[in-house]
Image (cartoon, grey):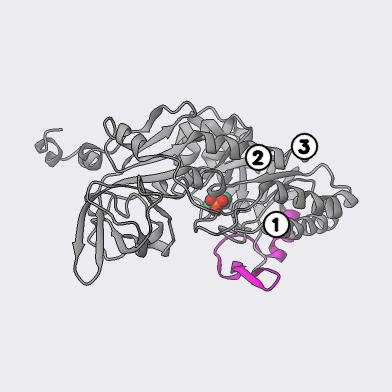
Amino acid sequence: MEKKAFVTKEKIEEIVKSYPTPFHIYDEKGIRENAKALKEAFAWNKGYKEFFAVKATPNPFLIDILREYGCGCDCSSMTELMLSNAMGVDGKDIMFSSNDTPAEEFAYAEKIGATINLDDITHIEFLENILGYLPKTLSCRFNPGGYFSLGTDIMDNPGDAKYGLTTEQMFEAFKIMKAKGVENFGIHSFLASNTVTNEYYPTLAGQLFELAVKLKEETGANIKFINLSGGVGIPYRPGQAPNDIRVIGDKVREVYEKILVPAGMGDVAIYTELGRFMMAPYGHLVTKVIHEKHTHKEYIGVDACAVNLMRPAMYGAYHHITVLGKENEACDYKYDVTGSLCENNDKFAIDRMLPKIEIGDYIAIHDTGAHGFAMGYNYNGKLKSAELLLKEDGSVQLIRRAETPKDYFATFDCFDIYKKMGF
Ligand SMILES: *Cc1c(COP(=O)(O)O)cnc(C)c1O
């Protein structure tokens, strides 16, 4: 697939008059079309629900758009639960899929009526000790171990992942929970990340559906939902074929009809907790070229850095780059595109072929709508950028202001130094 920016140079020149670079900008139209397609792809399942993985893009304005398509929230921490609750998301539309969970977070999740998804068998007792009872509905995260492969391709390595219960533990956990009065059960699993293939969900679903049938037979547990979690990916690189959510939905239906329906489990709800798939393609990090440097390599210095987008530095992740206004020029210059952190891995691109870049050019870094702004940090005293929404009518709305030095120093507000800065 060809990768095109959803903003033009002219649009950015207009936007920077109000909001200086760098900033993350999100495409409302793209978010809506994709959310609608997901909803339709799983419309065959009566109880289907997408719980958007809040950690991917914790912005209430964006989450509110998804809520129009029936999405709830999947939370991993106290602040994400607080945000979802403050947004008026009903407890039944909140999934709490955390791990190594602090006691107060379990207590708060229960208080706001969220569904709790346990990451370990010991959390049954941990939770019971906190609450004095077990909720009527509980879910467990499953980790079969080994490798997760599709055909001959190894997709990921669950055996090395800290998450979830083993197969034996799933059976034991369900027996214990049932004996302690739990009435409604859920099964959750997340076995491979950023899968760019239509086979991931159907294959995972097949494994979970078979497990569900056995769990029901052996423990008598009333299984209400199966949560396929996240992991459906996006084509970060040009030339990659995107997932087709309609095909994925149809294939999950096929396995559902093959495994669950004959077992008398045709009323089980399918849940998803997609993050990346919902948002990543619909965000750009927009940054301005402020320096060029010719030493042992050709460097382009921009006004964003890894605190605005950590994935390249952290995972060596590829993010496509468009030099705005030069979309049709030949890519015959090789650059490293860098930020200003005192870390040599602060590079958005290494040896990337791009059009000739000049100081003052605006660059769109693609696919930053999920795990982009959200992974931001403050190293080198850098401040987090604004987030903007490009609305369907072409107007732009500020959906998070940029951090200021006052925000950065706010945790010193009980000390004299804060007053000396004149805040
Ligand atoms: C991160 C995460 C997700 C979302 O993952 P994506 O790869 O963004 O789809 C969903 N569920 C859980 C439990 C997660 O930790």
Q: Helix or strand or loop: what does disc 3 sit on?
A: loop
Closer mark to the observer between disc 3 and disc 1: 3
- From the viewer's perspective, is the residue at label 2 or at label 1 nearer? 2
Residue at the disc numbered 1? 173
Q: Residue drawn at (77%, 37%), measured in percent from left and top?
A: 46
Picture disc at residue 37: 2
The residue at 28%/54% (across/down) is 357
Give the residues drawn in magenta, as a range.
Answer: 147-175
Q: Is residue 138 magenta?
A: no
What's the amino acid at mark 2? Ala
Q: Amino acid at mark 3?
A: Lys
- Pointer 2: residues within 10 angstroms few (<14), some, or many (20+)? some
| Residue in the image at 59% along x and 59% along y | 195
The numbered mark, 2 or 1, whose residue comes first in the sequence reads 2
Residue corresponding to mark 3: 46
Q: CA distance from mark 2 to mark 1?
A: 36 Å
